[in-house]
Amino acid sequence: MKKLMIGNEAVARGLYEGGIGLVSSYPGTPSTEITEFLSTYDDIHSEWAPNEKVAAEVAFGASLGGMRTACAMKHVGLNVAADPLFTLSYTGVTGGMVICVADDPAMHSSQNEQDSRHYAIAAKVPMLEPADSAEALAFSRDAFALSEQFDTPVLLRMCTRVAHSQSVVELGERVAVETTPYVKNGAKYIMMPGNAKKRHPVVEERTKALAAYAEDCPFNRVEMGGTKIGIITSGTCYQYVKEVFGESVSVLKIGMPYPLPEKLFRDFAAKVEKLYVIEELDGIIEAHCESLGLDVIGKELFSPIGEYSQGSIRAAFGLEAPKSTALDEALPMRPPMMCAGCPHRGIYYTLAKNKVTVIGDIGCYTLGAQPPLSAVDSTLCMGASVSGVHGFNLAQGENAEKKTVAVIGDSTFMHSGMTGLVNIAYNASNSTVIILDNSITGMTGHQQNPTTGYNIKGDPAAKVDLEALCRALGIGRVRVVDPYDLAACDAAIKEELAAEEPSVIISRRPCVLLKTVKTAPPLRVNEDKCKKCKRCATLGCPAISIKGGKASIDQTLCVGCEVCVALCKFDAIEKGGCAQ
Amino acid sequence: MKTTNIMIVGVGGQGSLLASKLLGSLLLDEGYDVKVSEVHGMSQRGGSVVTYVKFGEKVYSPIITEGEADYILSFEKLEAARWASCLKDGGRIIVNTQQIDPMPVLIGTAEYPEGVLDSLAAKGISVDALDALEIATAAGSAKAVNIVLLARLAKLLDIPYEKWLTAIEKSVKPRFVELNQKAFSMSYHK
């Protein structure tokens, strides 16, 4: 059966057909849908883990237990899971294990554009890289056999364009795989020095065997065309090369970017007059060519920054661009923003009003950095707010403690904020942490997490008691506020900043986009009362605009949260708008 | 056979996803190779969103760059202008005349460009502007804007009218089929 699937759904299908028994992941754009689609198959076990390290270790345990298993994460998630990855390379697997990692060149939804292929090289683990959904399905399916044949976890590298593009796939049957009975094997699985020393040579030999396998494996292929130009490429770049050149050039299409073969490269190079490498981000294939002494043009022509396209490749080769017309005038940007009724807005408004320094984190609430609130001072990585605020306060001294907070979401707190909070308590930091508890993992599109009370299937699950948890971690002052109540937010922030001990404020209200949240009818502006002060516009609510100097509320966007009502000194914002 | 390139652009949350889904599966049923590409994540929060739909005998790149789009289907005026440079020479923009102010306009740091559609026409770009919201509302629901816009595209593609109605039936919930087919018909015959 033919079907259109995004790359991530195809990965899920491939893993399913390949006999996966368990998947554990933490959401992260552009990888999230792999696990979401896997969770729709009832004959496998799927779960959200609190972070990528836990996910990879759950998958490791399942592999040790003889089951085919996978975990999926975004590129920066692999940083978190790097610890198990490097030693998994030594232990190898029992059940086949696939680690799906999705890179985000151009940073559509990420804080950096690191190239995950470096991990394959550093951990000495083979990596596969599909170029469309059909390959995503086939590579994921076949990765299990590769993993078991070479006794190694396999990295499957996606990128945004492959992960989120739909293309045609052909569905196959799921293979029946029995769980391997467990046999204790300490020499392979207990990685203390005596054993690990014996495993390292195994890893080196395996890499040689994989490089030999790569010479004529099904993942790499040569497409001979014109021989004046030869292009070595992989992933989504292959599609751009074909779009620009068709059959007029020869292509060595790499589907296994690590380890790379030698003879295949030399033979291809010998057949073409001029050799190019086209790969997004870093020059990894190019470096391999250079190590073989091949004369190749790569990063001198193609940028290590951002995404490529057929347009950028045409430009690099000096080919004529299609004629196009653009308007002369500059157009206003349309950046993403916090939704109307977003519970984060009340807290950010209060922080901005009190000129508080905000050590931020990763999630929807990063959008609090956008004007007009401009309330965030830093965003580094998952969890860095809680750890970072302590260091900042130590550097800046007592004055900073009274003017600085960390903000972190519920899911991010579970991911890696807890350890930072322990550190605050343990090292007697007088820091203030605000947990923005919107009862969901928001930015990645509403995934459950340990604080929501539901699992990946939507079934009831153990629910972390955040207040009790923070107390157990050593924080004496823990309080909860409703972010729609500006007066309460103001009091809480002022009092906790003034306190002479560390404190946690839990700002609790579910994401307004949740289906379970009942919103109120829209509000309206009483034009007779509006004095054109524009105070309501400082909230940065997309439902509020200024028309002819006076405030106006978009009746289709407003959810009646009434945060603006509290702000208006002239009582000009009233109930009784007209719902559409 | 050449590839036909369609861009669907708008503001996050406007429902362009259904339009690309319907179009993609219809084109697949018609026997074409199809690629549909969108970016999830940040862009969903009221930001500018773009989806690429490409079909032909064999489609390689999933994206559309400057001067390549045969058609741009825009859910909002400013977004039509933003992506106009992707339009092929001789291409056509179908645009809903709705105006959604972006944050810089809402907070008064930028102006919404006046007469933006006239500016496009003045550049020699072929523009099919319609109040899709009005047609959709007349058909029974403001949410049918996507179908109203698709109907204008349908007039330009070589796919029989009935096939579109069938595609609607396959893509929307049973209780909304009639409403959406009505919206399609009203817009197609306008």
Image (cartoon, coloured by chain):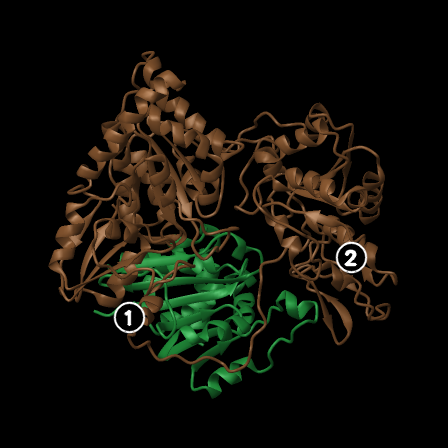
Query: In terms of secondary structure, where does tag 2 sit?
Result: helix
Tell me the quadrant of the picture where the N terminus of chain A can be found: top left
Q: Is residue A301 left or right of residue B18?
A: left
Q: Label 2 crowding class (10 Å Cα cut-off): few <14, some 14-19, many 20+? A: many
Q: Nearer the viewer, residue A69 or A112?
A: A112
Residue A47, visible in the rendered structure:
no
Nearer to us of marks 1 and 2 is 1
Residue A40, visible in the rendered structure:
yes
Q: Assess whether mark 2 and mark 1 are in contact (beta carbons under 8 angstroms).
A: no
Q: CA distance from mark 1 to mark 2?
A: 54 Å
Position above or below: A99 against A238: above
| Chain under disc 1 | A
**Amino acid marked by disc 1:** Phe
Query: In terms of secondary structure, where does tag 1 sit?
Result: loop
Residue, disc 1:
A317
Residue A398 x, y percent position in the rendering: 81, 41
Q: Which chain is brown?
A: A
Residue, disc 2:
A564
